[in-house]
Image: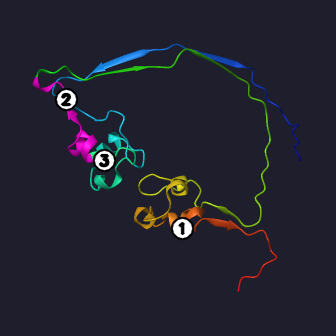
């Protein structure tokens, strides 16, 4: 028995989403330690939450490249941050307001894309690989591979997984060469 099905096309109707601005004000209790600066991230774009989950060992090595502030200065968990409301001062207040109201309309049309890699194309392998810091090959594209061997996961480091570091897998569809 052979079953043949006809091709189908799915078209979505346009959708409209509207958001209204909101303002949230949060005041820290007097004597509370808060991250300082409040939006601090390290050179890997990790905030104090990362250090709370993973510890502060070596934190001084990953200072924010723009400010020079590392987790030992910015994060309460690492001995930094600042205590608010001490000495009779007012607690720190943070106010955040969303953007102006926006309306977005989008329509999804069916598409088919077929991509055939060129001979000699390199693919990061394994696909979706991340190092022990949770960083993928795109980090190494931007910041380089120096020291990548220290951040391997499951026995694979960026030198093996990422094309930019000399790893990955090459699609050798070009059969006109000989390996000597």
Please give the name of the residue rendered at 42% of the width and 65% of the height, measured from the top-left corner: 147
Q: Residue furthest bottom?
A: 180
Q: Which residue is mark 1?
A: 160
Residue 79: percent from left, percent from top: 20, 44
Image check: 67 left or right of 137? left
Q: Secondary structure at mark 3?
A: loop
Q: Which residue is mark 3?
A: 70
Earlier sequence position, callout 3 versus callout 1: 3
Q: Are marks 2 and 3 in contact (CB under 8 Å)?
A: no
Q: Quadrant of residue 41?
A: top left
Camera-side residue of 115 and 99: 99
Figure label count: 3
Please give the name of the residue rendered at 64% of the width and 66% of the height, measured from the top-left corner: 169
Residue 73 colored magenta?
A: yes
| Depicted 141 relative to depicted 37: above or below | below
Residue 111: percent from left, percent from top: 79, 37
Q: Which residue is mark 2?
A: 32
Q: Quadrant of residue 7?
A: top right
**Span of residues in magenta:** 72-87
Residue 39: percent from left, percent from top: 36, 34
Q: Secondary structure at mark 1?
A: helix
């Amino acid at each position: 028995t052979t079953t043949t099905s006809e091709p189908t096309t799915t078209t979505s109707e346009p959708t409209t989403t509207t958001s209204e601005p909101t303002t949230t004000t949060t005041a820290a209790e007097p004597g509370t330690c808060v991250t300082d600066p409040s939006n601090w991230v390290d050179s890997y774009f990790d905030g104090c939450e990362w250090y709370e989950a993973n510890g502060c060992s070596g934190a001084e090595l990953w200072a924010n490249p723009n400010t020079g502030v590392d987790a030992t200065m910015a994060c309460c968990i690492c001995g930094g941050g600042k205590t608010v409301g001490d000495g009779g001062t007012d607690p720190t207040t943070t106010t955040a307001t969303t953007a102006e109201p926006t309306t977005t309309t989008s329509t999804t049309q069916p598409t088919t894309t077929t991509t055939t890699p060129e001979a000699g194309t390199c693919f990061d392998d394994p696909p979706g690989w991340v190092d022990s810091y949770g960083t993928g090959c795109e980090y190494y594209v931007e910041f380089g591979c120096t020291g990548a061997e220290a951040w391997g996961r499951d026995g694979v480091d960026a030198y093996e997984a990422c094309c930019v570091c000399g790893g990955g897998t090459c699609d050798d569809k070009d059969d006109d060469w000989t390996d000597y």
